[in-house]
Image (cartoon, grey):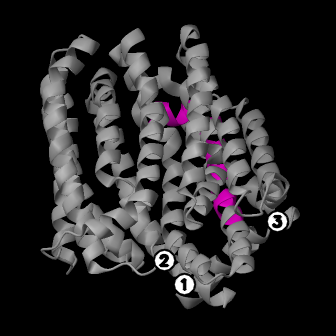
Amino acid sequence: MKEKIVSNTFKSIVWSALERFSVQVLQFLISIILARLVYPSEFGLIALLSIFISIAQSFVESGFSSALIQKNNRTEIDYSTVFYFNVLVSLLLYILLFFAAPLISIYYHNPVLELLCKWMGLGIIIQSFSIVIITKLTVNLDFKTQAKASLSAVIISGSFGVYLAYNDYGVWALLIQYLVNTLLNTVFLWWLSPWFPLPKFSYNSLKYLFPFGVRLLLAGILHSVYMNLYSLVIGRKYTVMDVGYFSQASLVARLPSVSLMAVISRAIYPIQCKIYNDDSVELSHDLFVKYLRMASFVIFPIMIGLAVLSKSLIFVFLSDRWLPMSEYLFILSITYIWIPLLVMNNQMLLVNGRTDLFLKSESLKKIVGLLILFLSMPYGITMLCYGLLVYNLIEVAIVIYFSKRVFQTGYLTQFKAIRNILLSSTSMGVIMYFTLLFIDDVYFKLVVGVLIGILFYSFLSNMLRIKEFSDFRHLILSARRSS
């Protein structure tokens, strides 16, 4: 039973990884090209609007996607009801955002934001048409279709955005790329998926899903507001250029950890829900530990390596005009190393249907986060980044406390599960740091740093007998033999 679930999970993760990584790698390459063509201040303008777009998107999704996945006996009427609800809410929110655009531009003392906001808000409506289709594909573990749609959209929109940026369209190149990507992804999903909503709307269905969804909605809004509040504060207190540096550092730092966890979590969430509904508690616990170790084994060394090589990576890929963000990237890379613990414990609350505890956890975390934000705000952006580091450690502690109330896997069990992986990753980072002190050439430093990181992490993982290292090694050897 366990072996079969792990096998099915692995297949799901492979397709999920193909979809996420191919898209993220392409988007990263495109963003590198755009960063060389567009000024940091123009990236900052888009970042200033992200808080309003993120909050609106939280309202549109409303937590109903997770509610549909968690529900065991979902029907086509459920899907159709959520679809119509999403579209209606997106229209109402766009109207609100349209009339709020002048106030946003006044707040930031930047007239161009009014028109940018009105155009950028269209993405909310477009995206609302794809939410239920993505949910349905996720329930069916069909990440292959999602990969085809998103990959095609990124290639076309990215090419379009780079062309516009090359021809000096500046911030409008970034905006048009975002809108074209959102539109094409939605169109391709509808084209590739045979699903079409029924001409029915059920208040009973909405009423059933609402208690689960509304708590996720509130938690999602709290999270969106907090994560974007830094850009809001920096944009008001500092320059648009500072917003560009911080937002790009945050984007790059979150890319490996958040993207990898998105790959793993969305593949295993439907499976975990099914296991929970089948009352297999022991199996659920074993798989939780296995997934946590698997995610940590991949993410920990990448984040520590990113921190050590932050300055070299920025110089080589983004050019020297982005170097002021290197200090932010170093701190934020260490900050987001704990994403596997955070996501896995949050997911267990959802699997158990405890959105009440999820909301309590999120509320407590954001109270602490706001306190840290306002205490660190007067001391500059670097101190804001350190504040985020402290917040993330407290955030993990809080969510484990709440998840332990429904799922008996507490601090000690989880620390033991990742202890050797954390030790190997940290030791690798220390060795990289002191070795690279003797190298001056930035390109040679980057190449040597990556090679040393891979070799020493492999050596330490093997020496500490980390099971995931053996699993990955056997997987690579099997792939070579089959080819």
Position of 193 relative to 370 (above/below): below
Q: How far separated are the C-alphas under marks 3 and 2?
A: 27 Å
Which structural element holds mark 1? Answer: helix
- Which image quarter: residue 368? top right
Badge 3 is on which residue?
Answer: 462
Q: Quadrant of residue 206?
A: bottom left
Residue visible at 87% across and 62% down in the picture: 464
Given residues 473 and 88, the one toward you in this image is: 88
N-term mark: 1 or 3: 1
Q: Is residue 191 above or below residue 425?
A: below
For disc 2, the marked residue is 12
Q: Is residue 358 above or below residue 436?
A: below
Does residue 394 show up magenta in the picture? no
Q: Which residue is mark 1?
A: 8
Is 153 left, or right, of 225 in this rendering? left
Rendered-image quadrant of the N terminus: bottom right
Amino acid type for the residue under numbered disc 1: Asn
Instruction: Give coordinates of residue 422: x percent, y percent.
Output: 77, 50
Q: Secondary structure at mark 3?
A: helix
Between residues 411 and 322, which one lies in front from this camera angle? Answer: 411
- State the residue at coordinates (52%, 87%): 483
Q: Which residues are magenta?
A: 293-316
Please tell me whether mark 2 sits on a helix, a strand or a loop: helix
> For mark 3, does the 10 Å Cα neighbourhood hold few (<14), some (14 to 19), or many (20 or more) residues?
some
